[in-house]
Image (tube, rainbow, N blue to C red):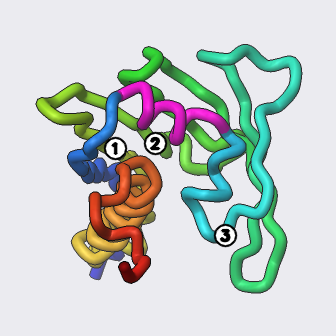
């Protein structure tokens, strides 16, 4: 009986949300590194790396706490069209295919924001590829929902105060 080696497989996952905000307002929230503390509950500090450009080639540093441990990582902007598109990669990621993209499209009344992820699923996990895809999709949707809460104005009459 011959052992069949399972191949790694690159998957793409896309999630989107419609926001009642302009592309500029959405961009102002998702582009600066410093706002990451609002977007990811694990991030405790984030910053643009001094000396890097403010577009393609920009690097951003993130310090986070996950599972009781401090983690540091660096991302690089690979492509950018301000207020429309950004593609980033984690510097030093062993997954050469790993990329995260953000596409902003103006729609009536606001902006459609899409998060696009490309990752490699190791051959040992390919049989569970649908579950892996669902985990990435759920994480992307949770991220987009946090953006919605932060960027959209509160509904009128929902100030929480009693009159």
SS at badge 2: strand
80 within the magenta span: no
Estimate the spatial distance between the alpha carbons at disc 1 and disc 3, rounded to whole Å.
21 Å
29 within the magenta span: yes
Dominant SS type (magenta): helix
**Is the residue marked by circle 1 packed among few (<14), some (14-19), or many (20+) residues within 10 Å?**
some
Image marks 1 and 2: residues in contact by CB distance under 8 Å? yes
N-term-proximal mark, 2 vs 3 = 3
The image shows residue 27, relative to residue 142, as above or below, that is: above
Q: Position of residue 89 (x, y in %)?
A: 57, 38
SS at badge 1: strand
Q: Position of residue 97 (x, y in %)?
A: 47, 41
Could you tell me which quadrant the C terminus lies in? bottom left
Q: Position of residue 58 (x, y in %)?
A: 69, 23
- The residue at which mark 3 appears reads as 42
Residue 5 appears in the rendering: no
Q: Which mark is residue 100?
A: 2
SS at badge 3: loop
Residue at left 47%, top 41%?
A: 99
Residue at left 87%, top 25%?
A: 50
N-term-proximal mark, 1 vs 3 = 3
- The residue at which mark 1 appears reads as 116
In this view of the protein, which residue sits in the foreground, 75 or 95?
75
Which segment did they paint magenta? 23-32
């Amino acid at each position: 009986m011959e052992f069949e080696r399972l191949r790694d497989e690159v998957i793409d996952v896309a999630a989107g949300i419609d926001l009642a905000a302009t592309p500029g307002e959405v961009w102002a929230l998702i582009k600066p590194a410093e706002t990451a503390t609002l977007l990811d509950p694990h991030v405790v500090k984030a910053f643009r790396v001094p000396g890097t450009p403010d577009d393609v080639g920009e690097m951003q540093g993130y310090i986070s706490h996950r599972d009781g441990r401090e983690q540091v990582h660096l991302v690089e902007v690979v492509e950018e069209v301000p207020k429309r598109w950004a593609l980033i990669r984690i510097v030093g990621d062993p997954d050469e295919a790993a990329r995260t993209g953000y596409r902003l499209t103006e729609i009536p009344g606001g902006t459609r924001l899409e998060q696009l992820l490309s990752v490699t699923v190791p051959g040992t996990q390919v049989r569970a590829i649908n579950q892996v895809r669902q985990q990435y999709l759920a994480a992307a949707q949770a991220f987009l929902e946090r953006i919605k809460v932060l960027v959209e104005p509160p509904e009128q009459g929902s100030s929480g105060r009693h009159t």
